């Protein structure tokens, strides 16, 4: 019999035994009150120094305790090197660059527990003696954190909610309260978009410890001391008043730095925003969960603040905000002489390569799809991420098992309208830009990204999420360091120039952030959103890269302003507050 039933009986009949039973039950329930935390770190196992030695007919690799011997293979332009660690622990693909004498390539780590996708990160090995190269593999940490605050509600139940900063699974497991039944604790609430309350998970319990299965992985939660240091809080349960410190200049990263005051931004206004909006402890899954906020003005970084354990050297998931990279990469490829134009029909062998096979003559409208249509999401293909019944819906594409080549899957979608007639949000179409770039250049997306974006923008670490066939997925989800991803926005503000070097043409930069279509009540250019804000009795136009959870890099050319947010409100409408409330109500009023 539960405590509520016992309490009712006692009120009706009265009994010392009843009161004793209630006390024992409440004592057991109170054991659950507090902050429960768990973090699973799944490696990856392979990381650190890598030494490669070239012999007459083979490579020898020394990496994380593995010693491999690989036959030498000469490519058309360079000596190639590929190897895998036994047991599926990772693989390397690279080349010996004859000009720099470096071995340049990518390390692919195994699929993560976070989202089930593998990631590729750059590796550069430099010669340290004749025929020997040394470098370092720096994979993305594969981790998954969970927080479960539990408190006693006025109705006697134990209120709770589930927060997962890495993926946002607190939205999908919308916990309302917990109940203990012997050696188990039931998490009660509603699954995502389900109105019926149910038992979400049943955790195994022992005092101070819960073990819970989430998506087939076991997580060990501990009841932590009620202190001030948990990363559940932005900067502690009872944070000190915010103290502004200008960001440091980091040699080699390319950012000039300044201060808020020097760039005519109110320090008090920004401090109020951080204290009022970011620092207060969350009371529910609906509260903002900001991981980082950065501001640059006149090309100088003036604010860089991180919360909830995130920091400048921790790469952050940018979700669909990375779609804007597809646009920048196209512009950079054209600027660097790749035989490609925005008006090129996509479904011809020259542009789409093998992905064009078998679909050219099926529907004449398909032959009129251009690269520009893909960048503006106006291809006319049956690809609508907001419609679960659309065959090209991103979730449908990524979960189906019949076709693991996502380029080919998208290329074979039916036509539902004339190209250029309407813009419809389509991740698969933006990803298809990768096939166009690879076919037109004869090079991999990894190589193009490194040569045209990462190297000139002084970006050393990033993590490209890969499709099942190994190509980088341009539909979103690349992990970047916060300062690095922000550079794409500054590049557009500078009309295609970063630190004096032209990356894309001025015309392409301006066209990219100009409205070509209307979508979701905003403008859309070449994979960049466009909106407007009131500012001092006038309207200013802003462009931004936007991603699920609150990933925003926004530029306002009239104010020479760049704002970046990184957040963890994945799949929750709260993330829209950044562009709808935080920018117009806090950031813009702070400008002098």
Image (cartoon, rainbow, N blue to C red):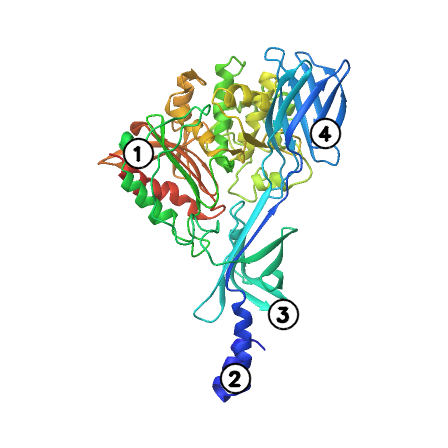
Give x and y (percent) for residue 171: 51, 52
Of residues 355 and 244, the one drawn nearer to the viewer in this rendering: 244
Q: Earlier in the sequence, mark 2 or mark 1?
A: 2
Q: Which residue is mark 2?
A: 9
Which numbered dot is residue 84? 4
Q: Could you say whether the residue bearing mark 2 is in a helix, strand or loop?
A: helix
Q: Could you say whether the residue bearing mark 3 is in a helix, strand or loop?
A: loop
The answer to whether 479 is drawn above or below residue 12 in the figure is above
Which numbered dot is residue 344? none
Q: How many marks?
A: 4
Of residues 228 and 317, the one drawn nearer to the viewer in this rendering: 228
Mark 4 or mark 1, whichever is nearer to me: 1
Mark 1 or mark 3, whichever is nearer to me: 1
The answer to whether 196 is drawn above or below residue 254 in the figure is below
| Disc 2 + disc 3, Cβ < 8 Å | no
Q: Earlier in the sequence, mark 1 or mark 3?
A: 3
Of residues 261 and 217, the one drawn nearer to the viewer in this rendering: 261
Query: Residue, x 48% and y 15% (percent of image)?
Result: 335
Give x and y (percent) for residue 541: 32, 31
Of residues 60 and 363, the one drawn nearer to the viewer in this rendering: 60
Q: Which residue is mark 1?
A: 260
Q: Tell me if I can see residue 549 in this picture.
A: yes
| Disc 4 + disc 1, Cβ < 8 Å | no
Q: Which residue is mark 3?
A: 182
Mark 2 or mark 1, whichever is nearer to me: 1
Q: Could you say whether the residue bearing mark 4 is in a helix, strand or loop?
A: strand
Mark 4 or mark 2, whichever is nearer to me: 4
The answer to whether 339 is drawn above or below residue 518 in the figure is above
Q: Residues within 10 Å of mark 2 (few under 14, many from 20)?
A: few
The alpha-carbon separation of the residues under discs 2 and 1 comes to: 64 Å
């Amino acid at each position: 019999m539960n405590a509520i039933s016992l309490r009712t009986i006692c009120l009706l009949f009265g009994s010392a035994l009843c009161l004793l039973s209630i006390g024992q039950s409440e004592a057991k329930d109170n054991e659950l009150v507090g902050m429960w935390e768990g973090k699973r770190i799944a490696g990856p196992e392979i990381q650190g120094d890598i030494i490669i030695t070239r012999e007459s007919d083979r490579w020898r690799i020394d990496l994380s305790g593995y010693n491999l011997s690989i036959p030498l293979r000469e490519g058309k332009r360079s000596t190639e090197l590929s190897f895998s660690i036994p047991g599926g622990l990772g693989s390397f693909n690279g080349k010996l660059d004859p000009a720099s004498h470096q071995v340049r390539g990518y390390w692919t780590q195994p699929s993560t527990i976070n989202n089930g996708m593998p990631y590729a990160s750059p590796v550069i090995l430099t010669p340290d003696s004749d025929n020997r190269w040394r470098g370092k593999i720096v994979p993305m940490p594969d981790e998954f954190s969970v927080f479960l605050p539990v408190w006693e509600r006025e109705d006697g139940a134990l209120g709770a909610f589930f927060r997962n900063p890495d993926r946002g699974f607190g939205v999908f497991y919308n916990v309302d309260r917990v109940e203990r039944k012997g050696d188990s604790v039931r998490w009660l609430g509603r699954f995502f978009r389900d109105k019926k309350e149910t038992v979400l998970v049943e955790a195994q319990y022992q005092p101070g410890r819960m073990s819970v299965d989430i998506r087939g992985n076991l997580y060990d939660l501990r009841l932590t001391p009620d202190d001030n240091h948990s990363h559940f809080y932005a900067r502690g349960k009872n944070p000190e008043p915010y103290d502004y410190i200008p960001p440091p200049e980091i040699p080699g990263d390319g950012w000039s730095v300044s201060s808020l005051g020097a760039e005519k931004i109110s320090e008090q206004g920004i401090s109020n925003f951080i204290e009022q909006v970011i620092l207060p402890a969350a009371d529910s899954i609906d509260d903002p969960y900001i991981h980082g906020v950065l501001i640059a003005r006149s090309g100088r970084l003036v604010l860089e603040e991180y919360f909830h354990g995130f920091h400048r050297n921790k790469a952050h998931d940018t979700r669909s905000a990375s779609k804007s990279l597809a646009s920048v990469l196209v512009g950079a490829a054209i600027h660097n002489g790749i035989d490609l134009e925005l008006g090129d029909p996509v479904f011809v062998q020259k542009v789409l390569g093998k992905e064009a096979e078998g679909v050219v003559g099926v529907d004449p409208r398909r032959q009129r799809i251009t690269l520009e249509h893909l960048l503006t999401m106006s291809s006319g293909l049956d690809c609508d991420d907001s419609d679960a019944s659309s065959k090209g819906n991103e979730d449908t594409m990524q979960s189906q098992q019949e076709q693991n080549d996502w380029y080919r899957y998208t290329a074979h979608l039916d036509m539902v309208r004339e190209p250029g007639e309407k813009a419809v949000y389509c991740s698969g179409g933006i990803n298809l830009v990768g096939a166009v770039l690879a076919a037109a250049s004869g090079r991999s997306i990894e190589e193009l990204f490194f040569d045209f974006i990462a190297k000139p923008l002084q970006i050393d670490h990033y993590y490209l999420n890969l499709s099942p066939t190994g190509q980088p997925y341009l539909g979103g989800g690349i992990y970047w360091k916060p300062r690095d991803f922000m550079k794409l926005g500054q590049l557009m503000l500078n009309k295609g120039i970063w630190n004096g070097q032209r990356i894309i043409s001025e015309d392409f930069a301006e066209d990219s952030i100009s409205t070509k279509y209307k979508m979701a009540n905003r403008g859309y250019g070449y994979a960049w959103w466009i909106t407007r804000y009131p500012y001092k009795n006038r309207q200013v136009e802003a462009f931004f890269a936007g991603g699920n959870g609150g990933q925003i890099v926004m530029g306002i050319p009239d104010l020479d302003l760049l704002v970046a947010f990184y957040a963890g409100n994945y799949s929750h409408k709260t993330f829209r507050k950044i562009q709808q409330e935080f920018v117009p109500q806090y950031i813009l009023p702070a400008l002098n």
